[in-house]
Image: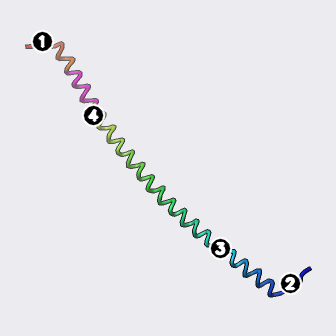
């Protein structure tokens, strides 16, 4: 079996230290990517909320228009049955 010397241990520790530094760098990059993704999701959520608000407003307007049309149709139907001067 190979003799374990302090130089060999030192080289192994240096290699482990370099690999751990690479892992930490990768972890930082992943953290940055996750934060960017989080920001994107927040903006998508806000866009969906804005679209929902716009659609709700349009639905309200359409309901009012439909109500007015029904009233007008009702008045036109009533006029047919009322005596004309």
Q: Residue at x 23, y 22 (%)?
A: 73
**Residues tagged 4 and 2 counted as in contact (Cβ below 8 A):** no
Residue 33, horizontal then vertical, whole percent: 54, 63
Image check: 23 left or right of 39?
right
Tell me the residue that label 3 is attached to.
Answer: 22
Of 78 and 36, nearer the camera is 36
Residue topped by disc 2: 4
Q: Which mark is residue 13?
A: none
Kindly report which numbered mark, 1 or 2, lies closer to the viewer in this rendering.
2
- The residue wearing badge 4 is 64
| Tag 3 and tag 2, C-beta contact below 8 Å | no
For marks 1 and 3 on the same chain, the one whose residue lies earlier in the sequence: 3
Q: In the image, what residue occupies the spot 31% across and 38% down?
A: 60
Q: Earlier in the sequence, mark 3 or mark 2?
A: 2
Q: Earlier in the sequence, mark 4 or mark 2?
A: 2
The reply to whether the C-beta atoms of the residues labelled 1 and 2 are less than 8 Å apart is no
What secondary structure is marked by label 2?
Answer: loop
Question: Which type of secondary structure does the marked residue at label 4 adopt?
Answer: helix
Coordinates of residue 41 in the picture (x, y in percent): 48, 55
Name which residue lies at 65% across and 76% down.
21
> Is residue 30 positioned above or below 64 on the image?
below
Q: Nearer the viewer, mark 4 or mark 2?
A: 2
Q: What is the spatial separation of the Cα atoms under label 4 and label 2, in whole angstroms?
A: 87 Å
């Amino acid at each position: 079996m190979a003799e374990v010397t302090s130089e060999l241990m030192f080289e192994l520790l240096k290699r482990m230290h370099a690999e751990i530094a690479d892992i930490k760098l990768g972890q930082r990059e992943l953290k940055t990517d996750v934060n960017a993704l989080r920001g994107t999701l927040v903006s998508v959520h806000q866009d969906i909320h804005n679209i929902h608000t716009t659609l709700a407003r349009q639905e309200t307007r359409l309901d009012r228009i439909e109500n007015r049309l029904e009233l007008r149709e009702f008045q036109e139907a009533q006029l047919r049955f009322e005596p004309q001067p």
